[in-house]
Image (cartoon, helix red, strand yellow):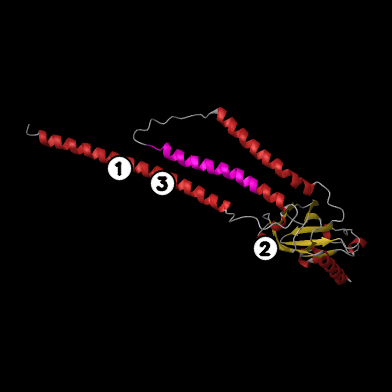
Amino acid sequence: MLHSPPTVACAVGRGNRRGEILLVFRLGVLGMGLALLVLIWLITLISTYFFVAKTWWLPVGAAAAAGWIDHQFALTFVIMGVVFVAAQLSLGYIVWRYRQTPSSPPVQYSHGNATLEITWTALTAVLFIGLNLMGSTVWASQRFDAAEAGAVQVEATGMQFAWYFRYPGPDGKYGATNPKLIDPSSGGEAAVGLNTSDPAAKDDVVTGTMFLPVNREVDLSLRSVDVIHDLFVPSLRFKQDAVPGLNIHMHFKPTQIGEYEIACAELCGLGHYKMHGMVHVVSQEDFDKWVAAREAEKQ
């Protein structure tokens, strides 16, 4: 009996300590689960805001196809945005709902659900293929359909690290080029390897800046001297690789007068960052004057 009170007190003390530890554990689990839920939801909602507010978006379109391309971009972002937000909000809830607690059952391992995996794979395929088919119409029309009659002919040649543009002149024919004549260090006609002895080359105009008339189709021919480059004009919604050994044709129609930056969207070497140029979209009258002035310089 003399030892009973201390024994009881010790037992009570141990019970209180276990209760305190259990309480702290529960609060810790509660706090961690809640913190992860809040973090996941905040990241999701904040990143979604920037897209909804169009903080990062394409510049104002200045080409005939811009409206359709922008609509396709917006549709894709909306559909994928809904999927993204739903998935992330569900993830936050799952982290909270199935957090570990003292009363949690033992972990059960699952080998998956074949029906669910087939279903979401099929839905993803339908969504991906469907969006691609919707976007293929305008993409194919710019590459596989012939340009309009009377389209302005321009040849763009990419090289490390500059763009050169060639116009066929009044005869409407490009002069012959020869890889052996290419000398990028000399610039101009030598940079594209123009054979000046060819009669058709006499009126060819080679320049480092692209000039185009507004509201007139442009039949663009893309070439590359060395590696793969990519002619990218965001405002004109134009983007196409230039591949060595290939002559790739595309056509588009600028609809607004202005100056638009050209970028190379293919990592083409150490000087890739400085490979840029300008597109000047001008009136037909100013374009004719510009071509005439370039022809006069060749005399």
Q: Which residue is mark 3?
A: 35
Q: Amino acid at mark 2?
A: Lys
Front in this rendered view, residue 148 or 8? 148
Task: Confirm whether residue 33 shows in the render.
Answer: yes
Image spot of residue 82 (x, y percent): 57, 43
Q: Residue furthest right?
A: 199
Q: Which residue is mark 2?
A: 274
Task: Confirm whether residue 192 shows in the render.
Answer: no
Q: Amino acid at mark 3?
A: Ala
Front in this rendered view, residue 257 or 264? 257
Q: Is residue 57 left or right of residue 210?
A: left
Q: Amino acid at mark 1?
A: Val
- Where's the C terminus, which quadrant? bottom right
Q: What is the secondary structure assignment of the residue under circle 3?
A: helix
Measured Cα–Cα span from mark 1 to mark 3:
16 Å
- The answer to whether residue 117 is above or below residue 161 is above
Measured Cα–Cα span from mark 3 to mark 2:
45 Å
Q: What's the magenta region?
A: 74-100
- The answer to whether residue 9 is above or below residue 283 is above
- The answer to whether residue 134 is above or below residue 103 is below
Q: Residues within 10 Å of mark 1 (few under 14, many from 20)?
A: few
Q: Which residue is mark 1?
A: 24
Can you tell which quarter of the image residue 114 is in?
A: top right
Give whichever of discs 3 and 2 has the lower sequence position: 3
